[in-house]
């Protein structure tokens, strides 16, 4: 993973980030497996007397370790990005204080007047 990939990951949606996280977990599982297979292969090579051939196996041991490390980083990035603060609030639009509530309709004549008035200015009806 290159540094230029990080903004892409941070811009990814939740599904992609979950996939990144599980990809990291998979690498963490595969890494040690590769190392163990390489080590067992190496022992087999030593037992058969081919010490130099073990060098090739040893590179796979390192490769497994790198896979484990990369998987760890990938999983952490996936997990951290998932917990990152959500983007600016884009939920349902909430209008500012409804202007209608500042006015009332007179029960008697139907005239509209402010809630701060206790009497209808048209007919004098009490609210
Ligand atoms: Zn009135």
Image: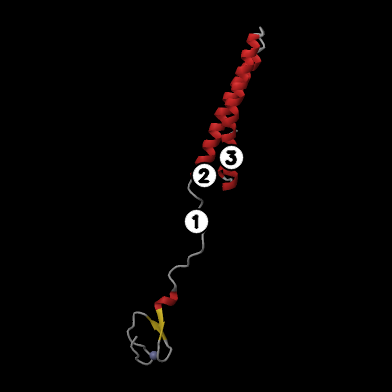
| Left or right for 102, reference 5 | left
The secondary element bearing badge 3 is classed as helix
* Residue at 52% over, 58% down: 90
Q: Nearer the viewer, mark 3 or mark 1?
A: 3
Where residue 66 sits in the image (x, y, percent)? 58, 25
* Residue at 62% over, 19% down: 38
Where residue 94 sits in the image (x, y, percent)? 48, 65
The secondary element bearing badge 1 is classed as loop
Which quadrant contains ligand 1? bottom left
| In the image, the residue with mark 1 has its CB under 8 Å from the nearest atom of ligand 1 | no
User: In the figure, residue 2 lies in which quadrant?
Assistant: top right
Colour convention:
secondary structure
The residue sitting at the top extreme is 49
| Left or right for 76, reference 115 | right
Q: Are marks 3 and 1 in contact (CB under 8 Å)?
A: no
Question: Which comes before the other along the chain, label 3 or label 1?
Answer: 3
User: In the figure, residue 65 lies in which quadrant?
Assistant: top right
Give the distance between the C-alpha atoms of the residues marked 3 and 2, in whole angstroms. 10 Å
Where residue 98 sits in the image (x, y, percent)? 44, 72
Where residue 74 sits in the image (x, y, percent)? 56, 35
Label 1: how many Cα within 10 Å (few below 14, some 14–19, many 20+): few
Question: Which residue is nearer to you in this view: 4 or 40?
Answer: 40
| Left or right for 50, reference 3 | right
Specify the quadrant that holds the C terminus.
bottom left
Q: Is residue 3 visible?
A: no
Label 3: how many Cα within 10 Å (few below 14, some 14–19, many 20+): many
Specify the quadrant that holds the N terminus.
top right
Task: Provide the residue designation for mark 2.
Answer: 82
Q: 119 above or below 99?
A: below
Task: Provide the residue designation for mark 1.
Answer: 89
Task: Provide the residue designation for mark 3.
Answer: 20
């Amino acid at each position: 993973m290159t540094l230029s990939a990080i903004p892409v990951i941070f811009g990814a949606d939740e599904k992609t980030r979950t996939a990144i996280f599980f990809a990291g977990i998979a690498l963490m599982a595969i890494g040690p497996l590769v190392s163990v297979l390489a080590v067992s292969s190496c022992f087999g090579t030593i037992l058969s007397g081919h010490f130099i051939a073990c060098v090739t196996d040893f590179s796979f041991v390192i490769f497994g370790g790198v896979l484990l490390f990369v998987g760890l980083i990938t999983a952490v990035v996936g997990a951290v990005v998932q917990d990152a603060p959500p983007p600016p609030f884009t939920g349902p639009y909430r209008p500012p204080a409804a202007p209608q509530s500042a006015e009332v309709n007179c029960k008697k004549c139907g005239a509209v007047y402010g809630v701060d008035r206790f009497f209808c200015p048209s007919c004098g009806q009490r609210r």
